[in-house]
Amino acid sequence: MKRLLTALIIFLAGTGNGLAAVWEKNCEGCHNGTVAPTKEELLSQHPTPEDFLDAVKEAMREEKMPPGLKYLAAIKELFGRLPVKKAHAENSHGKVHESDEYSKYKRYFTPLPTLPPIPADNPLTPEKVKLGKMLYYDPRLSRSKIISCNTCHNIALGGDDNVKTSIGHGWKTGGRNAPTTLNSGFLKVQFWDGRAPTLEEQTKGPIQAHVEMNATPELVVRRLKAIPEYVELFKKAFPNDPDPVNFENVAKAIAAFERTLNTPNSPFQRYLLGEENALTKEQKEGMKLFVEKGCIACHNGPVLSDGRFHKFKSNNDTGRFRVTKNPKDKYLFRTPQLLNVALTAPYFHDGSAKTLEEAIRHMAEQELGQKLSMEEVRKIKAFLESLTGEIPLEARTVPILPPERQ
Ligand code: HEC
Ligand code: HEC
Ligand code: HEC
């Protein structure tokens, strides 16, 4: 009893101040109406803190929901008070056999499908992917003719550039870290601030951005039309288009190629698909912590991103606010994916975390209000390393690019 009380006091001390928005951080990622009921639905079904807590416990007992999240803090936030404790103690639930200890955590994760969703207006064809790959590697899409998508999203380096903030046209930087293009087709929105809904829209950004490739649609189209082999390739990729060499189609072809940049067969993927020994014990421990500490609340789905926006204040970059101008969106950033994250240091939208350990520690503090021990950090890191998959050979073989007409 005394232990319980002490735990409660420590708990309250830890949640009393400065930890607003527990629901948003710990719960909303799953409780968005797809995986689990929304806040409004839960509140209407469980109108008192006591009912609510019972429902939480039931969901944990049925292993529908991970243990270890800040349920009490969430309840306090939702109802303005904590549930009144019932007389009996609950302590014998949730015991599991040693052999199930890790596999029960699999249910929180989604294996990576072979392909991301393909939009109806941009079907994937071999001709289009071939063209898209050439454009991705072609520096002539930039004004200087020396910067390609692959300069900053180097497929051989894990789909990024491994520098703090990318360097583009005229050695300028946009002040943000380049995310990987690998598996980017699975993201629900593109960019750290989600300003592009699709890969097609995304692609048009960097080609024109002054700090990236600094070209114009006209310049790109003019240059491509002067390369006979490209004209042929566009005809093949867009057979029904009377004037296929246009900026829309450049974006479509590159997006189609990006949708093939998926990395199957990571140790974690193999583990999810049933290969029990694909993960080390340390990695399994890390997976367990990833669920129990609540990382899974935001990092979920096939690429471990909920595609939603969460507060992360690091410098004066206001994130989502720059797109919507809604004060509520200040310092919100889209959850990045975590596949191949071991390859893409440094981390965060501003590249401010040099190592994965630093990023993990910082996440736990900022997003979950928890301090992790060195051992916990080590285990989570080991788990994240198991997310490194195989970059398809076809994608990382540099294409031969056709010459301009003389
Ligand atoms: C990893 C995903 C996940 C996270 C994170 C999560 N939940 Fe859940 N939760 C679920 C699932 C799945 C269910 C079961 C839903 C069902 O049965 O339809 C559930 C059920 C519940 C229920 C019972 C619903 C019912 O009517 O039976 C409550 C209450 C609840 N969660 C509260 C919370 C709170 C509070 C938090 C944050 C502290 C939270 N959950 C975090 C996935 C999650
Ligand atoms: C000068 C470096 C640079 C170049 C060149 C560049 N990018 Fe990027 N890319 C970035 C940076 C930095 C971001 C993040 C910007 C932001 O979120 O505001 C980004 C974001 C992205 C994203 C979003 C990924 C995510 O997780 O949200 C995709 C996809 C992408 N770029 C593809 C491309 C393609 C395709 C090209 C070529 C047409 C390209 N990039 C050219 C630096 C670059
Ligand atoms: C409330 C949602 C939320 C929770 C919980 C959360 N994250 Fe994150 N995570 C984010 C967001 C948002 C970012 C992007 C921050 C930025 O740079 O703007 C991020 C970034 C990261 C990155 C850097 C990825 C990159 O490519 O730069 C890592 C690694 C990471 N999280 C791991 C974790 C771990 C481990 C946990 C649990 C200890 C966790 N996260 C908990 C939302 C969350």
Image (spheres, grey):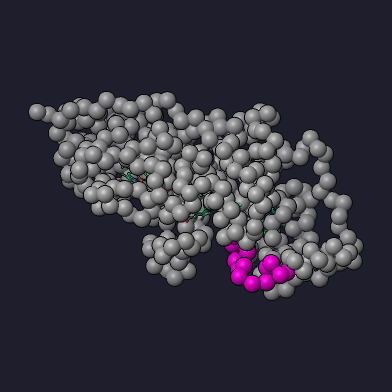
At which x and y percent is residue 363? 57, 55
User: Which of these two is toward me, 232 or 295?
Assistant: 295
User: Which of these two is toward me, 254 or 299?
Assistant: 299
Determine the image quadrant of residue 43.
bottom right
Assess whether residue 17 is covered by the magenta stretch: yes
Which residue shows up at 44% across the image and 37% down it?
158
Res 149 visible = yes
Please state if 9 lies on the left or on the right of 133 as rendered.
Answer: right
372 relative to 117, above or below: below
Q: Quadrant of the C terminus?
A: top left
User: Which of these two is toward me, 339 or 5?
Assistant: 5
At which x and y percent is residue 182? 44, 38
Please state if 322 lies on the left or on the right of 95 as rendered.
Answer: left
Please state if 217 lies on the left or on the right of 63 as rendered.
Answer: left
Which residue shows up at 17% across the image and 44% down it?
219
Which residue shows up at 69% across the image and 30% down it?
276
Please state if 293 lies on the left or on the right of 210 as rendered.
Answer: right
Q: Quadrant of the N terminus?
A: bottom right
**Outermost residue to the right:** 88
Assess whether residue 259 is covered by the magenta stretch: no
**Outermost residue to the bottom:** 80
Q: Which residues are magenta?
A: 12-26
Magenta: predominant secondary structure element?
Answer: helix
Determine the image quadrant of residue 221.
top left
At which x and y percent is residue 252? 32, 40
**Outermost residue to the front:** 374
At which x and y percent is residue 339? 52, 40
Which residue shows up at 39% across the image and 67% down it?
325
Res 259 visible = no
